Image (cartoon, rainbow, N blue to C red):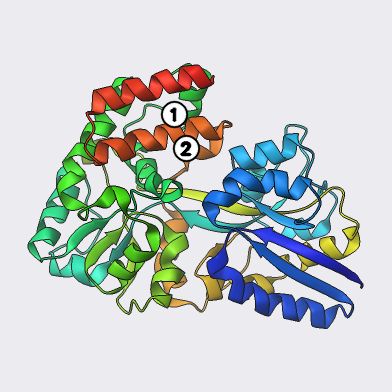
Amino acid sequence: MDGSLSFAHWRAEDKEVFDDLVRRFEDRNPGAAVRQDVLSSGSYLTTALQRIRSGNVGDVFAAFVGAQFQDMTSAGLFTDLSNQTFLSRVDTSALDLSTDGDGRRLGLPYQHIFHMPLANMDLLERAGVSEQPADWDGFLGLCEALRGLGVVPIAWPGGEPANAGQLLKSMVMNNAPWPDMFARIEDGTAAATDDWFVHTLEQFVELRPYVQPQALGATVEPLQQLFARGDAAMLATGSFHIGAVRHAGAEFPIDLIAPITVPRDEVRYVGVHNQSFVVGVRSDTAELDTALALVEFLTEPDVAKTYADGTVQHSCVTGITYDNPDLRTTAHWLTAETLLAPHVLVRDLEIRRVLDNASTEVLGGADPEQAAEQAQHLIEQQR
């Protein structure tokens, strides 16, 4: 099989593993050549659609589930994969997130991820906690005990918009009356000034003493190193950064932890999940057969296992047994009562940014009611 392909995505931390997989694909398909075109996640969100539509990159490309997938679908970027038999290897619930309004399967969700803070379980044990606190008082008590150990309880990347809002996802999961709370704010049937959202922002105020100094200017990579050194007990991003903190030298046991913001008898969800990194084929690629072959290759169980073990990303390909100890440790979240990440259902990326920014501003010092009112004003302008 011949053909030169561009594979466009945002997972720079996965490039080495993908390099290995690409070599295996090229060895199996003499004449094929695959180049990775990688951007940061923030740049990919804002520029990937235009770059891929230009035809210069992205014969095979990844999309974030939610607004970016919807925008790329509307732009006609995806080849219809509905008749491709290799999709039978993929979890059906994941495929539902990459299906358009006409029922066409347009991409391969490749990662099952969790939008909850990483936790250094050694430090939690030293703080007297061996499992996730069952309510808000318990979570605040954990943060206070961790601060008493002389470490930063929560490393929070307030200066990086793509990650600063990750904590909001688990903070609202039990506070909101509905699982699609952000979509309702988008369509006007709910508002950022509703009591449940303002209450969530008020709880962010309670977290201020437990984030690192100068948190509003902090980016992810230095905080990954802070966490890896054992100087921070939690990293408020998600499972997609476990591989990076291991690469930075973390040797302690890691699990995930979500702030439970309600009394224990009101808990509906213990975490937040997503099935992301939708791999698709550009509809106008001149190398359609080779591009389809690459996507099919990625669904082979041994290939998906190599990717999962090498990147510490749970796979949406079914029937895999992991060797990576972190995947084994966090596998219990796959069957836990977790909420689909609420931003997935928001079609407008700007509205998503406004909601994330409200929590960022409050954790950085803003008044909760004023931040909520400002967010609602911006959403109504955008709508």
Residue 41, label in figure: none
Q: Residue at x 32, y 63 (%)?
A: 223
Q: Residue at x 73, y 38 (%)?
A: 73
Q: Image check: 229 left or right of 343?
A: left
Whether residues under marks 1 and 2 lie with C-beta atoms below 8 angstroms apart, the answer is: yes
Q: Image check: 18 left or right of 165?
A: right
- Eyeballing the image, is 345 above or below 84? above
Which of the two labelled residues, at mark 1 and mark 2, occupies the earlier sequence position? 1
Q: Image check: 314 left or right of 253?
A: right
Picture quadrant where residue 71 is located: top right
Find residue 90 and report its horizontal and vertical position in percent: 68, 57
- Eyeballing the image, is 30 above or below 56? below
Task: Assign the C terminus to one quadrant of the image.
Answer: top right
Circle 1 packing at 10 Å, graded few (<14), some (14-19), many (20+), is many
Query: Which residue is the site of mark 2?
Result: 342
**Distance of label 1 from label 2 (alpha carbons):** 7 Å
Q: Residue at x 53, y 64 (%)?
A: 314
Query: Which residue is the site of mark 1?
Result: 181
Find residue 47 and report its horizontal and vertical position in percent: 63, 46
SS category of the residue bearing label 2: helix
Find residue 295 and report its horizontal and vertical position in percent: 76, 62
Type of the residue with mark 2: Pro
Q: Image check: 117 left or right of 152?
A: right
Residue 191 seen by the camera: no
